[in-house]
Image: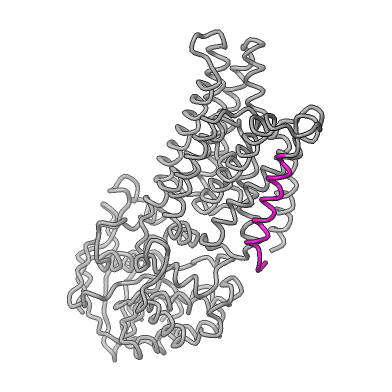
Amino acid sequence: MQVNIDHIGYGEHILVRDIAFTVAPGECLLLAGPNGCGKTTLLRSLTEAGIPSKTHGHPRPCKREGPAAKGSGRGRSEAEAVLEGMPASAKCVLIPTGIPKVKGFTLREFVRTGCYKESDWAGRLRKDTEERLEDALEQLGLKTLADRDISTLSDGEFQKACIAVGLTRQAGLLLLDEPTAFLDVENRLMVLRTLRQVAERTGTAVIFSSHDLHDALQVVHRVLTITREGRFRESGPQDRETVLKEAFPACH
Amino acid sequence: MKRFGPILCIALLLLAALDLLTGNGFGPVGGVLLWNLRLPRMLTALIAGASLALSGMQMQALFRNPLADPHIMGVSGGAGLGAAIVALALGTSAAWFSGMSMALAAFGGAFLTSLLIVVLSTRLRSTTLLILGVMLGFVFSALSSILQYSAGEESLKLFYSWMAGSFSGTRPVELAIMAAALLTGLVLAVWNRKGLDIILFGENYASFSGAPLRRIRTLSMLSASLMTGIVTAFCGPLGFVGIVAPHLSRRLSGSSAHAKVLPATLATGACLSLAADILANLWPIPLPAGSTLALIGIPFIIWYLCHASEH
């Protein structure tokens, strides 16, 4: 599918212009760039574009981002992302960073709760969704943990549970904001490998932002970068490292 | 605990029966006494406890704060100010003064405060809002004190007896209003249940799952303020049930999912206020229920705080 975004930012404060890239089913992409360059904002605007109906509940703006947020259309990101070629039944699912591991939910209950749009008023899932849930647990190796309280899971296991939510919700494009933040080396590698596997096995397109460039490079097909000056670049399969170096000139 | 459901039901029935046996001296239980005084009192305690507990549960989920409840958030304070304005500033001599007009003013105060909180909640972060609610409570009680300072003896007495909190003396009409409020609040809470669940994982996560945040907030605040407003109007400001009952239910059910917490909260809330009422009526001169509730509730909160810091 082809993604086109004219610009992202808040009101007068424009972070990045002219974003255009393609992403194919089964592809796993890394989104990299210095802090505050607009990675999260980009992921958010992609999600907003991917919500099928805009009539129910707008995503809440994140007011911490950007001093220009005040007074400019209630701080809403003003990007109008255009997604072409995405199947109508598929969704963009964003997994934000730092979801709390609330005590008193089993892993299975957590995944069901995350399927807000997909469940009925009592929180029950349709039969096919329920089957997808079990498939996702199986695929991510979470079957044995399904009835454990999520507060007892490791951060890596919990991150996998979040990925299970995305799969159950039938994500065509799965977006993850900093999935490897707060993880130790072992969990980090496990989560990264899982992302690649999920993309290849289920045909979901995966885009995640991360600062663990070295580890992430081992699993992604291509990279997307945003430079400090707000320029967007898309790499091919071969020039991943050159494009990354451009975004982080000080490191090399 | 696995069998918490039946245990809670038995406890509730026992406490309700025990409550019918206490109060108004230790004489034989006459039919008139039972039907006209004790049964309404027991039902009031039951409904009030369940309503306040359910309000507290919704506020704790909404603000993701274990100490949020209508009392803390200034809603009871608003009710107090409303009652104070009618009872103290206008005085009992006013032609239209009655217990009902004081209740109406208290309800108005509670509802306006909740409305203010709902409006602010769309602009402020949850923690800021909680602090603001506490501050509002202080402002309201300060204003009530100013009114008390200049009030006459008779109106003061009336106001104090309302402030102390009591389950007795409710008329059938008032009971019916409270029951209707509980039913409405309950329907709203059940309908909003999965919203209450997902909001526990943060507003970001909830909105990206497609949950309508504003509707979830409005529904739960509406439900909480309706129940709190009505109960406070007739029984006076009663604290602690709203904080304690949801925590007890989460512990008993071993879950935070509202499908399990909600029914358990209703039962524990009712049990707690029945226990407080029994405790209040054990003495030759009945104590104010608000105070016995505090006596039961505060040690629990201290225990919870000490326990929570360990984790």
Instruction: Verify whether residue B17 appears in magenta.
Output: yes
Q: Quadrant of residue A195?
A: bottom left
Overall secondary structure of the magenta section: helix
Point 39% across, 64% down: residue: A36
- Above or below, comparing residue B16 to residue A188 in the picture: above
Front-lying residue, A125 or A162: A125
Residue A6 position within the rendered picture, expressed as x and y whole percent measured from the top left: 19, 65
Residue at point 47%, 45% (across, down): B183
Which is more toward the observer, A145 or B283? B283
Span highlighted in magenta in the image: B1-20
Q: Nearer the viewer, residue B303 or A132?
A: A132
Quarter where residue A125 is shown: bottom left
The answer to whether B166 is drawn above or below residue A117 in the figure is above
- Left or right position of B83 against A14: right
B129 over A217 or under it: above or below: above
Quarter of the picture holding the C terminus of chain B: bottom right
Q: Position of residue B109 (x, y in %)?
A: 49, 29
Q: Position of residue A153 (x, y in %)?
A: 58, 76
Tell which residue pokes out farthest to the left in this image: A84
